[in-house]
Amino acid sequence: MSTIGQLDEAETAISFAAMRDIDRRPVPPAVRRHRFLMSVGQHAGLIAVATIFIAPFFFVVMTALMTDNQAVTPSFIPRPFQWGNFPEVFRQVPFIRYTWNTMQIAVLSTVGIILSCVPVAYALARMRWKGRQVAFLFVLSTLMLPIQVTIVPLYVLWVRVGQIGHLTPLILPSFLGDAFSIFLLRQFFLTIPEELSDAARVDGASEFQIMTRVIVPLAKPAIAAVALFNFLYNWNDLFAPLLFLGENQKLWTLTLGLTQFQQRHGTEWNLTMAASVMIMLPVIILFFLAQRAFVEGVTLTGVKG
Amino acid sequence: MSPWILGFLLLILYPMLSSLYFSFTKYSLLEQPVWLGTQNYTFMFTKDPLFWLAFRNTIWIIVVGVPLRIVFGIFTAWMLTLPRSGSRVYRTLYFLPSMAPPAAAALAFVLVFNPEFGPINQVLKGFGVSKPPLWFYGPGSSKWGLVLLGLWGVGDAMIIFLAGLLDVPRQLYEAAEIEGANGRQKFRFVTLPMISPVIFFSLVIGVIYGFQLFTQAYVASLATSGSSITDAAANVGAPQGSMLFYSIYLFQQGFQSFRMGYASAMAWVLFAITMVCTVAIVKGSRRWVHYQGGGFR
């Protein structure tokens, strides 16, 4: 395998050299024109698809700025631009309270996930112990288990301890680990060279010190990805809040609050969309700030598995 | 390891075993469980038309939605490999919809596809379609609305395909060109085998998550029936049960009608179906998934 790899590299080097030589020659005008047309065509196609992806956002924002009468007409452009819809959302539903509830759940769960999953992933990836492979298979198999299988008894459990309608069922389980996060972190930890740990061991570091001083600093991108995924998951989730918070509207999250403009006289689309914009905006900003971690994290889940 | 072991016991193993027990009982949460034997299961398979409706709807959305999502994911990822410049901007724009909260995305789609004033049907009418679909408001077209919603949020699958496409060694294409392969042949005999592990991964994940489809369908059916989120029991799956999916029916039985035993039985049937499908895909995959290192990684 390794010789083939080396051969491949040699070939690549040769073909790159060849390509450089070709590039040095003047490009015939016909070829240049063809390349230019190709690239125009490609960008036209890419822009067309991008438009399809972005159009719904555009329509959401436009509807968010319409009057409630105009929102149910076929027009695209708000007339007049009713910026008052955004403060109106705050007037009709306790939007700030929902934001605060959602933030609590998302931040505390994320902290819990990191604290509980990093040590487990470390033990699975970088320590030798009997039963390690079996433990890893258990983690993997829980990934396949539909939440529906465990949800009824968990609900009963939370009813028994009187925590339905509280935030506890949405936060506490995160401190006990999560299979997906463990899996992702383990995959990343495996890519860190073993020599680094060995060097630290020679210097007399304990496993805990190796984890906190050597591995965690190197694994920052993966930990960031896990944190972002969990924050986003909790921010976006509807099922768990719907199940565990139920009728206790004081503790509702943003996604639950979003559906409140449904009732009374039909759907108030302009306010629903104004609220949607405000829920999507933090996510989009977060994405732009941490794009790299997101993309690398998603890639890690699929390719190195 | 210990927090995870505690978590595993408390959040996975104990609930699994007790839901297995509940599945053989009648349990309303208010009284103690009453042993029924296999009655929940026989009722489900022989006497509950709604179970079969939910099952059929779920199979439909998986069979139609998952392959379309894979094809569209590969297509968009391939498009992103083309340009020499600006691909970062395009990648961001294509990925963005998959970040939107599913509840908000579903509401947006119900609006965009509104039969009377949504832009999609305006455009269709502009092209001379006299009777455009009712989309989320019609039993025949509501599931197509959900499929399109899934395609809009293709970003997460697309990014994995993109990584797979960029990993294909250039020399393989060059070798194929020397052999005289055209574009389509290169795709069929180089690209597809090389990204087949990624296709396999998306297929497995797509089927597992397909059976658990909940939020988008739940929110869309609330929005079309105009009911509030906590009082939707009568309207789940609107219009006319076309968006009644397995997980929605389970949720409605368990937590709105408080038939905890029946919901547990449904959950175990779901688990069994998921396992069978996953094993079938894994077995079948040996024929078409190509691992570069040889062997199963």
Image (spheres, rainbow, N blue to C red):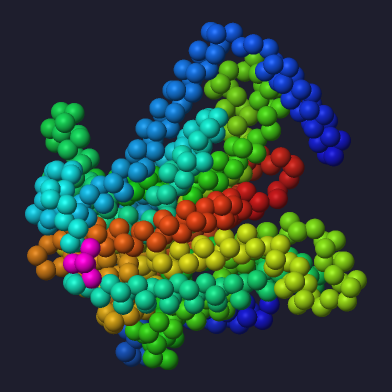
Residues A287 and A167: in front is A287
Using residue A294 as the reference point, say whether residue B60 is left or right of it: left
Q: Where is residue B41? Give x, y as percent.
A: 39, 70
Magenta-drawn stretch contains A74: no
Residues A50 and A244: in front is A50
Q: Which residue corresponds to the image point at 68% horizontal and 74% vertical from the top-left?
A: A119
Name the magenta segment's main secondary structure.
helix
Q: Where is residue B291? Give x, y as percent.
A: 69, 42
Q: Which residue corresponds to the image point at 55% horizontal and 30% vertical from the top-left?
A: B84
Viewport quadrant of the N terminus of chain B: bottom right
Q: Is residue B259 visible?
A: no
Query: In which quarter of the view is residue A129 placed?
Result: bottom right
The vertical placement of A33 against B197, above or below, is above
Query: In which quarter of the view is residue A188 placed?
Result: bottom right
The vertical placement of A113 against B110, above or below, is below
Q: Which residues are magenta?
A: A86-90
Q: Which residue corresponds to the image point at 51% horizontal and 13% vertical from the top-left?
A: A34
Q: Is residue A278 visible?
A: yes
Query: In which quarter of the view is residue B236 placed?
Result: bottom left
Q: Where is residue B70? Give x, y as percent.
A: 47, 42
Using residue B277 as the reference point, say whether residue B296 is left or right of it: right
Total number of numbered discs in the rendering: 0
Q: Which residue corresponds to the image point at 84% horizontal and 76% vertical from the top-left?
A: A205
Q: Where is residue B148? Give x, y as percent.
A: 33, 44
The vertical placement of B170 against A281, above or below, is above
